[in-house]
Amino acid sequence: MSSTPQVQVPRDPGRLPMTLPLLAEKKRLGEKVVMVTAYDYPSARAADAAGVDVVLVGDSAATTILGHSSTTPVDTGDMLVLARAVRRGLTTPLLVGDLPFGSYEVSDEQAVTTALRFVKEAGCEAVKLEGGGPTSVARARAIVNAGIPVMGHVGLTPQTSTALGGWKAQGRTAAAAARIAQGALDLQAAGCFAIVFEAIPGAIAEAIMPRMEILVIGIGAGAATDGQVLVFHDLLGIRDGLGPRFVKRYANLQQEMDAGVAAYAEDVRRERYPGPEHGYSIDAAELEDFLAAMAELR
């Protein structure tokens, strides 16, 4: 028996699809925005049923479901397959596609072409790119000018984690925090509708927030941001280990999955499965005729 607390899942058939103006209104009213990642149809359905506001098809799929040790190996083709599956599972959340490493850095033209694919081929309503430096800002501006909403991302940017010294908190010196703040302001000026603040001190995020006119989603950035995002597999415990410090685990599905598969394997080996209740019957006369026919087969 699972010890996971039973939570009543909201199901409101009257919920309207989330839009950029509705997200902006939530910020104006001080209503927290809920964002999660999703990588397939079942996870999208779970996010939809829970009534989250924004779903990100994150390049974290590289580590959560594709078995890589970092996010950089995932490519545009991989991401489009996942985004299309997520799209089929959503009715109301805004869908954002993560532009993978190497798909937008080369030129504005490359960035716009990749972003267009996420919109046309996968049904994404916005895209996200990482970094607050001049290249990322220029690419964000080009995509916005092409008519596609862009979500920025500053702080810990997993695609360039090697250059940042690994997967660790950013902005812990005055100079580093100032670079993050400048990047956020530059992305805002470039036309981004939202920015993710990842793994930065809460005090730094709180100090930047009064300058942010657009939506800010935090992940390991304290409570002052306009909303929060967690990786689907982190919050549900579908992974080994505890994960980053900022993760709060709301279930332990990996343990339950392991136990379920082990129980199935044990039943098969001990001939407890399948039982009569798992099979299909045939009329006795039909069976007799079949056995007679089998005897004639050569």
Image (cartoon, grey):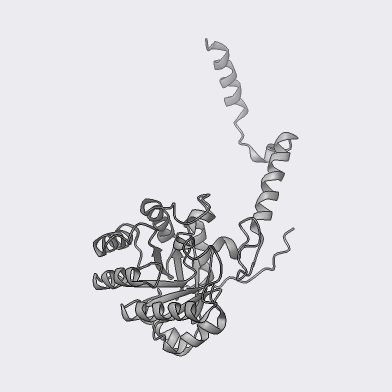
Residue 280, given in percent of the width and then of the height, sits at 61, 36
Instruction: Identify the image quadrant of residue 214.
Output: bottom left
Residue 105 left/right relative to 33: left
Residue 81, given in percent of the width and then of the height, sits at 39, 52
Residue 58, can we see it? Answer: no
Residue 197 left/right relative to 138: right
User: For the point 63% across and 60% down, which residue is it?
Assistant: 237
Q: How many marks?
A: 0
Residue 18, can we see it? Answer: yes
Residue nearer the viewer, 212 or 298: 212
Is 163 drawn above or below residue 292 in the view shown? Answer: below
Residue 238, given in percent of the width and then of the height, sits at 61, 57
Quadrant that contains the N terminus: bottom right
Is 105 drawn above or below residue 293 in the view shown? Answer: below
Residue nearer the viewer, 56 or 87: 56
Instruction: Identify the image quadrant of residue 294.
Output: top right
Instruction: Identify the image quadrant of residue 139.
Output: bottom left
Residue nearer the viewer, 169 or 273: 169
Residue 89, given in percent of the width and then of the height, sits at 45, 60
Is 31 drawn above or below residue 238 in the view shown? Answer: below
User: For the point 48% across and 54% down, which residue is it?
Assistant: 62
Is 155 drawn above or below residue 163 in the view shown? Answer: below
User: For the point 50% across and 50% down, which residue is it?
Assistant: 66
User: For the point 29% across and 62% down, which residue is it?
Assistant: 111
